[in-house]
């Protein structure tokens, strides 16, 4: 492991714009770390801002999906894609939000063995299908989600989170992005 968040030699902008420095300071204060994904994007502040705007909208903004459900989707998508960074980082988030370390582990290793309610199972089954074969999604797949209480807006949010993590997984994996070591011990 090196101090670089990725295998690419893309140093963080120096100096950081004041707004970026403030955002990073808030991250360190709230999380105790600066997530390596943010450090990785900080070579280009416009790309960093685009990434964080989309992430914050999908993962933190009001939604019919809980924060835990969105993190569960992130872990399942990342597991399917074998994205080391996102499995570790978002697995830690699932452990913290659920209070159940075994849930984060199950979602990383084989989400079907996790103790899920029928709604969560339907959501993750749909997320898996979108990840593996989005062109094969049919009305019956969306209707299954509706039958489990998801609104059409919720379905949009599921698809959006899946799409975002499919993109992020590819960037993280292809750049050799390393998870912050602190994630490994969180919420255990």
Image (spheres, rainbow, N blue to C red):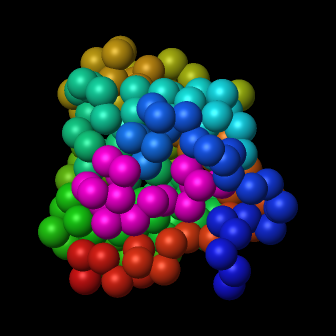
From the viewer's perspective, is 150 left or right of 113?
A: left
Judge whether 183 appears above or below 131 on screen.
below
**Quadrant in which residue 133 is drawn:** top right
Q: Quadrant of the N terminus?
A: bottom right
Q: Nearer the viewer, residue 58 or 113?
A: 58
| Residue in view at x 25 percent, y 83 percent | 188
Judge whether 172 appears above or below 114 on screen.
above
From the viewer's perspective, is 10 left or right of 180?
A: right
**Residue 100, image x and y in percent?**
20, 72
From the viewer's perspective, is 170 left or right of 185?
A: right
> Which residue is farthest front?
15
From the viewer's perspective, is 52 left or right of 2?
A: left
What secondary structure prevails in the magenta region?
helix
Q: Is residue 43 magenta?
A: no
Q: Which residues are magenta?
A: 25-40
| Residue in view at x 83 percent, y 61 percent | 8
Q: Is residue 33 magenta?
A: yes
Residue 130 visible in rendering: no
Judge whether 184 appears above or below 107 on screen.
below
**Quadrant in which residue 9 is drawn:** bottom right
Q: Nearer the viewer, residue 119 or 158?
A: 158
> Which residue is farthest right?
9
Q: Nearer the viewer, residue 124 or 175?
A: 175
Residue 149 visible in rendering: yes
| Residue in view at x 45 percent, y 32 percent | 19
**Residue 107, image x and y in percent?**
41, 66
């Amino acid at each position: 492991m090196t101090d670089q968040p990725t295998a690419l030699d893309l140093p963080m902008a120096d100096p950081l714009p004041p707004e970026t420095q403030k955002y990073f300071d808030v991250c360190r204060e709230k999380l105790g770390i600066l997530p390596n994904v943010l450090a990785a994007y900080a070579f280009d502040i416009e790309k960093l801002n685009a990434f964080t705007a989309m992430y914050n909208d999908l993962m933190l903004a009001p939604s019919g999906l809980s924060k835990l459900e969105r993190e569960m989707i992130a872990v399942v998508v990342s597991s399917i894609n074998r994205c080391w960074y996102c499995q570790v980082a978002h697995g830690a988030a699932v452990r913290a939000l659920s209070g159940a370390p075994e849930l984060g582990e199950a979602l990383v290793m084989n989400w079907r063995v996790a103790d899920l309610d029928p709604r969560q199972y339907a959501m993750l089954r749909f997320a898996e299908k979108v990840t593996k074969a989005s062109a094969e999604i049919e009305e019956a797949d969306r209707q299954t989600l509706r039958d489990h209480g998801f609104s059409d807006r919720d379905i949009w949010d599921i698809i959006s989170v899946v799409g975002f993590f499919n993109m992020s997984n590819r960037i993280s994996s292809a750049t050799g992005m390393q998870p912050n070591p602190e994630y490994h011990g969180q919420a255990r």
